Image (tube, rainbow, N blue to C red):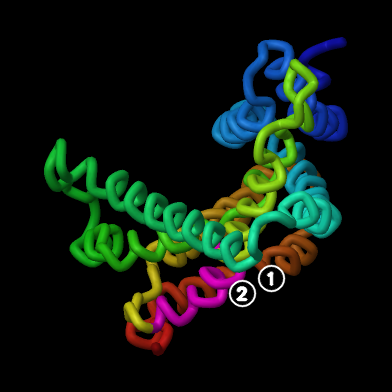
Amino acid sequence: MDAQKITHNSITSTSLTLLTPFISYILAERLHVSGVLAVVCTGLFIAWRSPKIFSYQTRMRSRSVWDTLIYLLNGFIFLLIGQQLPDALKELGKYPLLMLLAYGLLVSLVVIIVRVAWVFATAYSHKLFWGDAKTAGSQEMQDEMKTTWRNVLIVGWTGTRGIVSMATALALPLTLNSGAPFPHRALILFLTFVVIFVTLVIQGMSLPLMIRILALKPNLQAEKEELELQLLVLQNTLHFIEHEIPVPMEDDVKRQIKASYEAALVQLQQKKNRPKSAARIPG
């Protein structure tokens, strides 16, 4: 099959993205390494390289397909958790429930602390080894891009656990090669469930409160860049209609087409020139 056709056929390319995780998992299992981690690494690599691998039509189509699949798989995984948890509790009947919950909370606390410590170490490692890097742009842009401990803490606090953690726990074999049951598999499943519950419910529900307590200000740089990109697209579109459109067009028709784009351009320019105090979100 012609590689050029695969590159520009969004249906074929999207189908390949659906097959890639299975291929990655099977190859990893053949090599006797973690299939779950192999799928995660493959997903990170494809997401990083997707602008160069796939066309924009493929990225738009695959995003819609994967958003739907992720939504369905999330529901399926949590249904699977609900089915596995009673069996795990039966196997853990010899342990007091309060002791199991204490272990689960302790593991959750360790996971949260390690996550926050890792995020802080990663955020400040560049400053530690290379010093303060000068950010290009205005002083306002430098202030918005500057790393603060509040922002780093919020990023560390959002380390919720979900599908990957449970999939890793469920991927543990039921028995060893000798035929003996896998040691403490039910306990691992229960502790994983507690970690998922704590990080999703407790950390997730407390996130808006932490943002208010830390008095974080909205980052306007991303909104400013998006606005400039929209202006650039509109200006290029108007230039294309005026000078480069290949289809012959009457002047009245051309004016009608340009009118909507020109009106949108005026609105965006007014929004860009609006005083910053009016654009800021009160809080």
Q: Which quarter of the rendering shows the N terminus?
A: top right
The secondary structure that dominates the magenta segment is helix
Residue position marked by numbered label 2 in the rendering: 263
Amino acid, disc 2: Ala
* Label 1 element class: helix
Amino acid, disc 1: Ser
In the image, taking residue 13 as reference, residue 220 lies left or right, namely left
Query: Circles 2 and 1: CB distance less than 8 Å?
Result: yes
233 and 88: which one is in front?
Answer: 88
279 and 252: which one is in front?
Answer: 279
Locate residue 182, reporting x and y percent: 71, 31
Q: Residue at x 42, y 54 (%)?
A: 110
Q: Residue at x 80, y 29 (%)?
A: 13
* Residue 208 among magenta residues: yes
The segment highlighted magenta reads: 199-212
Q: Which quarter of the rendering shows the C terminus?
A: bottom left
